[in-house]
Amino acid sequence: MTDLRKKINDAVSFIRSKTAMAPSIGIILGTGLGGLANEIEKETVIEYEDIPHFPVSTVESHHGKLIFGRLGGKDVVAMQGRFHYYEGYTMQQITFPVRVMSKKVGLGVDTLFISNAGGGMNPDFHKGDLMIMSDHINLLGDNPLVGPNDDELGVRFPDMSEPYSKELIALAEKIAVEEKIKIQKGVYVAVTGPNLETAAEYKFLRMTGADAVGMSTIPENIVANHMNMRCFGITIITDLCFPESLEPVNVEKIIAVAKKAEPKMTLLMKKLIERI
């Protein structure tokens, strides 16, 4: 047994001592988006710091709790708080909770919902818009699959032709029309951070084909695909990153925009979970 598998087993065994739930749906809640956790009918809440080998978030707006309960009539497990490369964690540490949640070797999750806050680079975007992630570009300079591969977790060279489920995207678009929720769809690019980008960097990132930029999500998505989990990703556009009219931003304003837009995201996610 590899060291990673042993750590996964340790974490799963501890969690199983607290709850017997086997949720099929996992949720990762990003910056300013923890309010969705309030919609969950909670069965068990576990602090990250209590789970063996779990990282502990150092970001103020990330709470650090694993929540088990019901949402949209389904059993779910939600990460209230996530981890970032800029915090100093390895890619393997950042994605460890996804392995623990997975149906393959963990708690039972086969569909993963990931939310984040990002800067909008598409000129059609506005603050507070929701962007469904249709694809991504990894500019983090690292990959969680680097190193020896454990064949029991996934294949050495996983396919990434559909990193975000087209079926879930289509259903989300249908729900958005029904609920009169304005949505965008686009490509998300991840960079390391923690500083925000320069005007020249935004111009470069836009030229790569990206519509929004952030500092998370892609490592978790890569590992989810490695373990044959369906993924749905959504970004709240919290600030606009147009090189010609770039203005200083601060984290407090970014979080405030995310919280204001959160009810729309919460409704969309709940309805989507209900109907899968």
Image (spheres, rainbow, N blue to C red):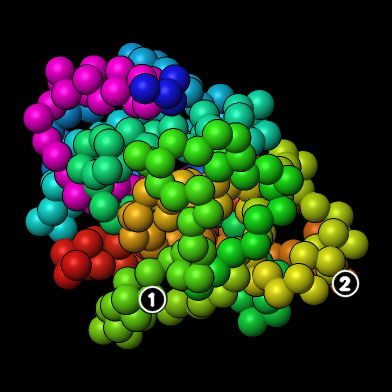
The magenta span reads 5-30
Front one among 102 and 85? 102
* 149 or 273, nearer to the observer: 149
Q: Percent x, y for residue 102?
A: 30, 42
Residue at which label 1 appears: 166
For residue 238, side relative to residue 53 (left or right):
right
Q: Is residue 233 left or right of residue 10?
A: right
Q: Residue at x 11, y 36 (%)?
A: 21
Residue annotated with mark 2: 244
Q: Is residue 182 above or below residue 20?
A: below
Q: Residue 14 or 213: which is nearer the viewer?
A: 14
Q: Are marks 2 and 1 in contact (CB under 8 Å)?
A: no
Number of marks drawn? 2
Residue 26 included in the magenta stretch of the image: yes
Q: Residue at x 54, y 69 (%)?
A: 135
Q: Nearer the viewer, residue 97 or 162?
A: 162
The part of the image, by quadrant, that contains residue 41 is top left
Label 2 neighbour load within 10 Å: few <14, some 14-19, many 20+ = few
In the image, residue 175 lies at what x, y percent? 28, 78
- Is residue 180 at all visible to an observer of this figure? no
Q: Is residue 121 above or below residue 26?
A: below
Inspect the magenta stretch and tell me whether residue 67 lies in it: no
The label on residue 192 is: none
Classify the position of the N terminus by image quarter: top left
- Residue located 30% across and 83% down the image: 174
> How would you rate the neighbour count of disc 1 (Cα within 10 Å): few for under 14, some for 14-19, many for 20 or more?
some
- In percent of width and height, residue 94 lies at 52, 34
For image coordinates 62% across by 44% down, the residue present is 143
User: Is 160 situated above or below 10?
Assistant: below
